[in-house]
RNA sequence: GAUUCAGUAGCUCAGCUGGUAGAGCACAUCCCUUUUAAGGAUGGGGUCCUGGGUUCGAAUCCCAGCUGAAUCACCA
């Protein structure tokens, strides 16, 4: 009997796998299985009086078994949900051979196995819609036990709640925790809903480069990589703005892209290194139009998803119905602090910040100071959807100056639940102004701002050919999903949030041990005892301790191996 | 990056002021003709995250580390 590192349950399942094979049943058959209905359709549409569903074929995971003599109940889970199976021995084994029921179903099948069944739908005495099974086949064996989560009247028992487990093994989370698959369907539906709106307006869905020689369109630290053939650095995009505007130059009236962006910054409950944004650019529009359009989009998303516009998010009720409140940034600061900062110079602003205990430092210019004021004193208070308009020009190098005030820009953000959700501009299309703004950014960068934008001369060249007046808007899809599904962490709306890599212990091959003079039969023992590398054996100082450990293990587990002498063990170590 | 909390069976968790490692579910064996989170009985299963220290004795106390979470800081 070989020692093993598999748990008892895993060993049993592997044994069952072999038993199935011995019985001539392929635990991983290749042939397609002709499913003709989902569990959800059956539950929704079954009508006893019509006796519809007289012949159904369904497949999924076996999630529970309740065996009562020659009849059993089981639960089958497919993508749409669960349905109860009624399995009677003499129904699935009409002849003399009762192995399929007695051995395969009762003994060799486990929770998590994929099976397929054929039968008819009926209602049990307890009133539950069930499938009376006539035929049962094994579709795929599961050899790793699934945590068992139970649900009764909407109450969940023994849910797997450990975030590390849920995020690292999302496939398990999806199988066992009710609602998780549904949540990610909602995410998809949000995107579909937006796409419908854009397409119905005739805007074109496009794709632009993820690998960019100049990471533009936002202020953020990029990931950097290297292209071997060109032998140049390439950056993973931090935004798709500049490429989409090039397409407006090229003559499209409306373009949009659902894009993964990458930022090499901190990770927390609202930041993942890769995240999804949607950016849209529409020619001949301005930011006023875009505010209307954004409202329309958000309202539609809420309605399509929930059939209503008033949603609970955390402790708040949020009304997503149009129209949303609109305030200028300076107006909002005035409203929430009582201080009118319009016309103030840098020194005055700095004093205001000090007065209000807003932390500032020497590198901050006028725009940054106003931004800090807003972020500290206003943003958190804006729970209901609110457009904040007219940001200082220093903060918005890609945005057109305000038509009435050259210190401001025609920019708005949509703030919901105290957090920014959308960002939009009347896009800057003056190539000379654009180049100057880039040069301003370069100065910031020389001052040590590692998030200042790079100069993209090709983009300036594109603007020189002429770009029509255009309005653009970007929205974080992950954050939108969090809002719309009432999730508090970005990790909960990403299938595979970024995690520190799992530490896997290095394990040496048995050859390495035998090369060091250790007999093959002791290798697995050593590894089970935690000496997974030959170095870890060599690192030991006292052969006596190891000798005792392995002899003890041999005795305890009745392996029947001939114990080595202490001298032998000492040779392994030396 | 700072502070706090957590890590015990496949899963959810208990384990007090240090004294033989526990429950439920899951698993195994047996009994049972239709159950509803779970029919009954019996049983197996543990690197108490890792490494040090204190102690006659550590899951428990101390130190360091690993992993995760929360709060804060930073951050288009």
Image (tube, coloured by chain):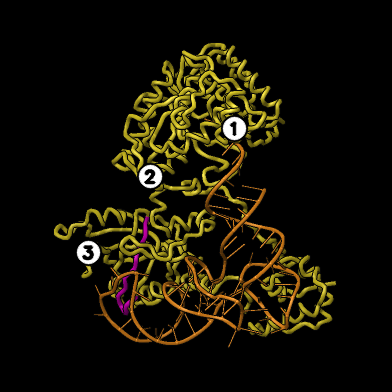
Chain colours: A yellow, B orange
Q: Which residue is the site of mark 1?
A: A354
Which of the marked residues, 1 or 2, is nearer the chain's N terminus? 2
| Residue A536 higher or lower than B70, as above or below | below
Q: Main secondary structure of the magenta part?
A: strand
Q: Which portion, as a residue range, is magenta?
A: A67-78
Tags 2 and 3 both on a single chain: yes
Instruction: Return the x and y of residue A208 as percentages of the image width and height.
Output: 53, 28
Q: Nearer the viewer, residue A535 or B62?
A: B62
| Residue A515 higher or lower than A327, as above or below | below
Q: Nearer the viewer, residue A297 or A169?
A: A297
Instruction: Return the x and y of residue A213 as percentages of the image width and height.
Output: 64, 28
Q: Chain of mark 3?
A: A
Please rate how many residues cluster around mark 1, counting C-alpha atoms within 10 Å: few if below 14, some from 14 to 19, many from 20: few
Measured Cα–Cα span from mark 2 to mark 3: 44 Å
Q: Chain of mark 2?
A: A
Residue A495's tag is none
**Quadrant housing residue A122:** bottom left
Which SS class for mark 2? strand
Residue A316's tag is 2
Q: Quadrant of the N terminus of chain A?
A: bottom right
Which SS class for mark 3? strand
Which of label 1 and label 2 is nearer to you?
Answer: 1
Which of label 3 and label 1 is nearer to you?
Answer: 1
**A77 sits left or right of A241 in the view:** left
Which of the marked residues, 3 or 1, is nearer the chain's N terminus? 3
Q: Chain of mark 1?
A: A
Which of the marked residues, 2 or 3, is nearer the chain's N terminus? 3
**Quadrant housing residue A93:** bottom left
Which SS class for mark 1? helix
Residue A122's tag is 3
Tags 1 and 2 both on a single chain: yes
């Amino acid at each position: 009997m070989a020692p093993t590192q598999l748990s008892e349950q895993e060993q049993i399942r592997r044994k069952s796998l072999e038993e199935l094979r011995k019985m001539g049943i392929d635990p991983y058959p290749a042939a397609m299985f002709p499913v003709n209905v989902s569990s959800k359709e059956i539950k929704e549409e079954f009508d006893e009086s019509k006796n519809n569903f007289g012949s159904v074929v369904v497949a999924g995971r076996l999630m529970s078994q309740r065996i009562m003599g020659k009849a059993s109940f089981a639960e089958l889970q497919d993508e749409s949900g669960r349905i109860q199976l009624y399995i009677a021995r003499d129904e699935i084994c009409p002849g003399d051979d009762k192995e399929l029921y007695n051995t395969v179903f009762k003994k060799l099948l486990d929770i998590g196995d994929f099976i397929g069944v054929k039968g008819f739908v009926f209602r049990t005495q307890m009133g539950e819609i069930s499938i009376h099974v006539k035929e049962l086949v094994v579709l795929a064996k599961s050899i790793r036990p699934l945590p068992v989560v139970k649900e009764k009247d909407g109450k969940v028992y023994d849910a797997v709640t450990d975030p590390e487990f849920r995020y690292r093994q999302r496939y398990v989370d999806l199988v066992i925790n009710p609602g998780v698959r549904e949540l990610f369907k909602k995410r998809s539906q949000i995107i579909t809903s937006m796409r419908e709106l854009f397409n119905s307006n005739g805007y074109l869905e496009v794709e632009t480069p993820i690998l960019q020689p100049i990471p533009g369109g936002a202020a953020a630290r990029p990931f950097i990589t290297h292209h071997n053939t060109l032998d140049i650095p390439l950056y993973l995009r931090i935004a798709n703005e500049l490429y989409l505007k090039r397409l407006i130059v090229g003559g499209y009236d409306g373009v949009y892209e659902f894009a993964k962006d990458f930022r090499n910054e901190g990770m927390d409950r609202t930041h993942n290194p890769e995240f999804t944004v949607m950016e849209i650019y529409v020619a001949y529009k301005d930011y006023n139009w875009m505010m209307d359009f954004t409202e329309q989009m958000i309202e539609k998303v809420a309605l399509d998803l929930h059939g209503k516009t008033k949603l609970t998010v955390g402790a708040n009720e949020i009304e997503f119905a149009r129209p949303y409140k609109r305030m200028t940034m300076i107006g909002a600061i005035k409203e929430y602090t009582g201080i009118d900062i319009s016309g103030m110079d840098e020194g005055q602003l700095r004093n205001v910040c000090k007065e209000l205990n807003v932390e500032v430092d020497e590198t901050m210019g006028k725009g940054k100071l106003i931004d800090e004021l807003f972020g500290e004193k206003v943003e958190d208070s804006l729970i209901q959807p609110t457009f904040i308009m007219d940001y200082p020009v220093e903060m918005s190098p890609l945005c057109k100056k305000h038509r009435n005030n050259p210190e401001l820009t025609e920019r708005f953000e949509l703030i919901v639940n105290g957090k920014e959700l959308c960002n939009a501009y009347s896009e800057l299309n003056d190539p000379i102004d654009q180049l100057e703004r880039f040069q301003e950014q370069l100065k910031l960068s020389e001052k040590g701002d590692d998030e200042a934008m790079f100069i993209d001369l090709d983009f300036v060249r594109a603007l020189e050919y002429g770009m029509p007046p255009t309005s653009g808007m970007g929205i974080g899809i992950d954050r939108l999903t969090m809002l719309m599904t009432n999730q508090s962490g970005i990790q909960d709306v990403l299938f595979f949030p970024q995690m520190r890599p799992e530490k896997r212990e290095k394990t040496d091959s048995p050859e390495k041990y035998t090369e060091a003079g250790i007999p093959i039969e002791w290798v697995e023992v050593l590894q089970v005892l935690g000496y997974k590398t030959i170095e870890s054996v060599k690192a030991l100082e006292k052969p006596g301790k190891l000798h005792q450990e392995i002899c003890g293990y041999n005795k305890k587990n009745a392996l029947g191996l001939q114990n080595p002498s202490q001298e032998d063990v000492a040779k392994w170590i030396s």
